[in-house]
Every structure is written in C-alpha cells, then in structure tokens.
C-alpha cells in the first residue's frame, strides 16, 4: 500500500483508478462471502434440527427395546435402534463438517472485511493528498544546526550538504 501512496503523491492518476477497481472487487468478494456464510448458517440449522429429531427417534427405540419382553420384538426394536443411531452419526459428522467450513468461511470473511477497510482508508488518504496540487511544489529543506556546524568545520558526518539536496529536490 505504501508504494501506491507514493505513486499517487507523484501524480500517477492510473494508480488511483486501479485502487478504486480493487476496492470494488473486494466489496463484491465481501458480499459473496456474506451470502455464502448466511447459506451455511441455514444449512447448519437444518442439520441441527435433523440431528435432534434423530436423537429423539433413537432414544424412543431404545426405550421400547428396554420395555419389551418378547424376544422377537426386542430384536426388531434393537435393529431400529441401531439404524437410527447410524443415521444420527451421519448427521453428526455432516454437522461437524459444516462447522469447520463455517469457521473457515468466517475467517475469510473477516479477513476480506479488514482488507477492504484498509483499502478504503488508503484511497481516502490518497485523495486527500491529491486534493491540493500545490502542496508539494514549494518545499523548503533546512539542515539541523549540528549538521551545519559539522559541515562548516569539515568534520566527518552522514549529513547531506545543501548542494546534494539541491540536486535531488530542485523544483
């Protein structure tokens, strides 16, 4: 993002347009992820309801098995008990898969939203920086007193001279 800001400060208007296009694409991505997340929420609710109904059915077959005294009916109730228990296990695995997918999608959605906010913030900063075209035309640079003294007496220094600065920043 820093490169984009520097390009905009140097007057690259295409970069601002590209950033706006990126913001639009990111906004669409966030909207798509929100719709997908809502869809998974309804799927999660549906599977949870089925899971609860299968548990009730599973327990009712178990209760019938415990109460019954004849062996033939006990065998029938036990087979229904096992069948409903297998269905419950399938629904439970499906519910766990949906939870994992929903958590991943939630993370992706939150990441996309944060990225969108940062892009919009950068766009606003760039627009603000470009709002005054005369802002960077008359720049004044002065050396610190320490640098001036060290240069004046010919001491070793990392400070640039005015001649070096003039070559770099002459407007």
Image: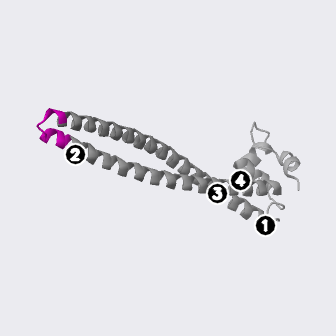
Q: Secondary structure at mark 2?
A: helix
Marks 1 and 4 sit apart, C-alpha to C-alpha, by 24 Å
Q: Secondary structure at mark 1?
A: loop
Residue at (18%, 37%) from the top-left corner? Answer: 73
Q: Secondary structure at mark 4?
A: helix
Does residue 89 show up magenta in the picture? no
Q: Position of residue 95 (x, y in %)?
A: 40, 43
Q: Nearer the viewer, mark 3 or mark 2?
A: 2
**Which residue is under mark 2?**
60
Q: Is 31 above or below relative to 64?
A: below
Horizontally, residue 120 falls left or right of residue 74, namely right
Q: Nearer the viewer, mark 1 or mark 2?
A: 2
Q: Position of residue 19 (x, y in %)?
A: 73, 54
How many other residues sit within 10 Å of disc 2, few (<14), some (14-19) or many (≥20)?
some
Q: In the rendered structure, which disc, 2 or 4, sits on the residue that comes first in sequence? A: 4
Residue 118 in view (yes/no): no
Return the mark for residue 27: 3
Marks 2 and 4 sit apart, C-alpha to C-alpha, by 57 Å
Residue at (50%, 55%) from the top-left corner? Answer: 38
């Amino acid at each position: 993002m820093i490169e984009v800001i520097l390009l905009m400060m140097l007057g690259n208007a295409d970069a601002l347009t590209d950033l706006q296009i990126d913001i639009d694409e990111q906004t669409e991505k966030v909207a798509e992820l929100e719709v997908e997340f809502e869809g998974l929420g309804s799927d999660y609710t549906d599977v949870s309801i089925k899971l609860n109904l299968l548990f009730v059915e599973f327990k009712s077959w178990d209760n019938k098995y415990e109460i019954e005294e004849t062996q033939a009916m006990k065998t029938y109730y036990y087979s229904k008990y096992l069948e409903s228990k297998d269905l419950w296990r399938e629904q439970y695995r499906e519910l766990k898969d949906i939870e994992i997918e929903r958590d991943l999608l939630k993370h992706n959605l939150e990441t996309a939203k944060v990225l969108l906010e940062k892009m919009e913030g950068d766009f606003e900063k760039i627009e603000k920086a470009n709002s005054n075209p005369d802002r960077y035309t008359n720049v004044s640079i002065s050396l610190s007193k320490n640098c001036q003294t060290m240069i004046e007496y010919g001491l070793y220094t990392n400070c640039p001279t005015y001649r070096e600065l003039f070559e770099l920043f002459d407007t």
